[in-house]
Image: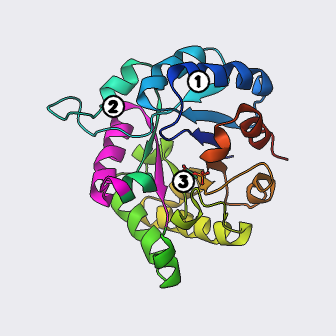
Amino acid sequence: MRKPIIAGNWKMYKTPKESLAFLDAFLPLVEDHTRDEILLCPTMSSLGYVLEATIGTNVRGCAQNMHWLNEGPYTGEISPVMLMSIGCRHVLLGHSEQRLYFNETDDRVNLKLKAALNHGLTPIVCVGETLAEREEGRTEETIRRQIRIALQNVSSAEAHRLVIAYEPVWAIGTGSTATPDIAEEAHRIVRHELALCCSELTAEATRILYGGSVKPENISELMAQPDIDGALVGGASLVPETFAKIVHYT
Ligand code: PEP
């Protein structure tokens, strides 16, 4: 059984005050919800506040990125040890905005993934093709490469907490969602590659989330697909009522 995850990625939005106001409105809307794990990924300045305000609730805070080393002269970075020390247990890695604007590479995602697993963090590794890659017929090749390199030297036993988010870059923040069929096809590719890189067991156990313009209107048909185990939601997670509707998909 793969318990679905509905994760909200707040990107570079919301001050601590706005984050806490979100939680005041959101937590009562989802307080009895047990079917899915609920995550919120705030900016670094809000993460500690969100982690503290969600203690004892069914919502967890998740970092948007991290460095792979424990400490060092890396201005602007945060380490896995530091995330663990504030009670953070989840981290997004390889988000397409990091790949696109900040030169994130497959090799660095691999270092970060291994560090996250070693420190007891649950990594959510984002993969997905650009529009050009899809149009050139390179979707499968791109997803397979991203998974293969991310999982280099990661054993099946180590990968038991791994989560993947398939996020076609052309669907992020554009309003155009992948159809359920397109998303399901990509998720099957991800699962197959997980079996090749790790094991059948890892492939069966790993939650694969879909991300890219998820909204209350399309979440149910996406979640009806057998290989879609949750959603990573950007824009639509910023408003408590909208994100709660997504959490309560049917
Ligand atoms: C994201 O930020 O991961 C994302 C999927 O954004 P949006 O839902 O806005 O497309």
Work out whether mark 3 precedes mark 1 in sequence or the reverse, and give the earlier one.
1
Could you say where residue 152 lies in the image, as x and y percent from the top left? 32, 58
**Residue bounds of the magenta highlight:** 101-128
State how far apart marks 1 and 2 are (Cα). Answer: 26 Å
Give the crowd class for mark 3: few <14, some 14-19, many >=20 residues within 10 Å.
Answer: many
Where 214 sits versus 78, above or below? below
> Is the residue 173 above or below the residue 233 in the image?
below
* C-alpha distance separating marks 3 and 1: 26 Å
In the rendering, which numbered label is found on residue 165?
A: 3
Q: Would you name the residue on which mark 2 appears?
A: 80
Nearer the N terminus, badge 3 or badge 2?
2
Location of mark 1 (residue) = 18
Specify few, some or many for label 2: CA neighbours under 10 Å numbering under 14, 14-19, or 20 or more: many
Give the residue displayed 31% in from the left and 39% down from the top: 115
- What residue sits 35% from the left and 31% below the top? 119
Q: Is residue 74 above or below residue 141?
A: above
In-image side of 185 versus 86 (left or right): right
